Image (spheres, rainbow, N blue to C red):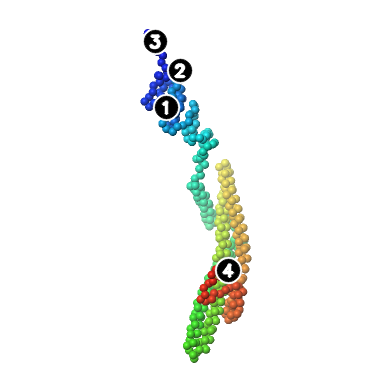
Amino acid sequence: MAQESPKNSAAEIPVTSNGEVDDPHEHGFSRDLKRSLPSGLGLSETQITSHGFDGTKEGVTEAGAFQGSPAPPLPSVLSPSRVAASHLAPQGSDLTVPAGGQRTQTKGGPVILADEIKNPAMEKLELVRKWSLNTYKCTRQILSEKLGRGSRTVDLELEAQIDILRDNKKKYENILRLAQTLSTQLFQMVHTQRQLGDAFADLSLKSLELHEEFGYNADTQKLLAKNGETLLGAINFFIASVNTLVNKTIEDTLVTVKQYESARIEYDAYRTDLEELNLGPRDASTLPKIEQSQQLFQVHKEKYDKMRSDVSIKLKFLEENKVKVLHNQLVLFHNAIAAYFAGNQKQLEQTLKQFHIKLKSPGVDAPSWLEEQ
């Protein structure tokens, strides 16, 4: 009986057409490891150890380099998370994968975590959500007050001062309109008197028999026109001062009043929400809502207190300024009207000098800003 020649174990390993080693006795873990590796991962120096059933024979097969990007050698045993991390991390960086699956960078290039990326669209959406919620609460508070179902915070003294201010503003606007009408009518009269004086002066030169009579009337109309221009300057100065008081000073105070009223509505809206939550049950689900509502209520309470203080201060300064301005303007208006209709030209001119009013001469343009310096 012929003795069989010993064969090398490595020679019995068949090779498939694509170059991969097909070992029927290969260890299960090594086979699973090869299948779990991504196709793009290079295997330039991978050693596959084959164990026989008897545990005495070992075969070592060197696989050729896979055509693709080169990669560093892999350890003999890799967990799935370690394989994924080594495939995703850039070369030259030390990347560790914690148990939660989030990637952290210990050294090398920066790694951006998905949960740390700030989305501007989400921030804008959050701002819109807060604005919508605040608008809804304020609208509900206004409707409940108009229907007589909700309560509102009222400062009786401050509300009375605001009502008086609004009523005075309407009355001052009426005085302003009437003064503007008087100025327009006086301007038309002065213009007519000046034309009439020129007509009398022309006839005085052409009618020798009525020379003196036409001359007297011409001088009278010209004097009346001059005094009318002086009175017109005083009235226009009065109109400008009252207009500044009404449409700037008082209007600025009323803007602050509107801001105060908006803060009051927000304060009452969040106060009502807090009261409703306090009346309900207190458990693990409602306590965080109550705490958040308490914080929002405190923020709007501080805003309301600040706006109320600002309105009180502005009303006080406005009253002092209003008395001072109107006192001077009313004295000017009275003295100018009285001197004009009394025919006291000297007193009328003295009134304008007292209030530093400069009249514009007919046919002369306004001085430039360099001349006024």
Query: Mark 3 or 2 closer to N-term?
Result: 3
Of the residues tagged 1 and 3, which is closer to the observer?
1
Query: Mark 1 or 2 closer to N-term?
Result: 2
> Please, is residue 311 above or below residue 80 in the view?
below
- Name the secondary structure under disc 4: loop
Please name the residue shown 47% across and 17% down the image: 56
Question: What residue is disc 1 on?
Answer: 64
Query: Mark 3 or 4 closer to N-term?
Result: 3
Question: What residue is disc 4 on?
Answer: 373
Q: Amino acid at mark 4?
A: Gln
- Name the secondary structure under disc 1: loop
> Please, is residue 62 above or below residue 176 in the view?
above
Question: What residue is disc 2 on?
Answer: 57
Query: Mark 2 or 4 closer to N-term?
Result: 2
What whole-number distance in Å separates the C-alpha atoms at marks 3 and 2?
21 Å
Q: Amino acid at mark 3?
A: Gln
Where's the N terminus, which quadrant? top left
- Front one among 102 and 90: 90
- Characterize the local packing of mark 1: few (<14), some (14-19) or many (20 or more) Cα atoms within 10 angstroms: few
Question: What residue is disc 3 on?
Answer: 3
Residues marked 1 and 4 touching at CB (< 8 Å): no
- Name the secondary structure under disc 2: loop
Q: Position of residue 49 (x, y in %)?
A: 46, 22
Q: Position of residue 161 (x, y in %)?
A: 60, 63
Where's the C terminus, which quadrant? bottom right
Q: Amino acid at mark 1?
A: Gly
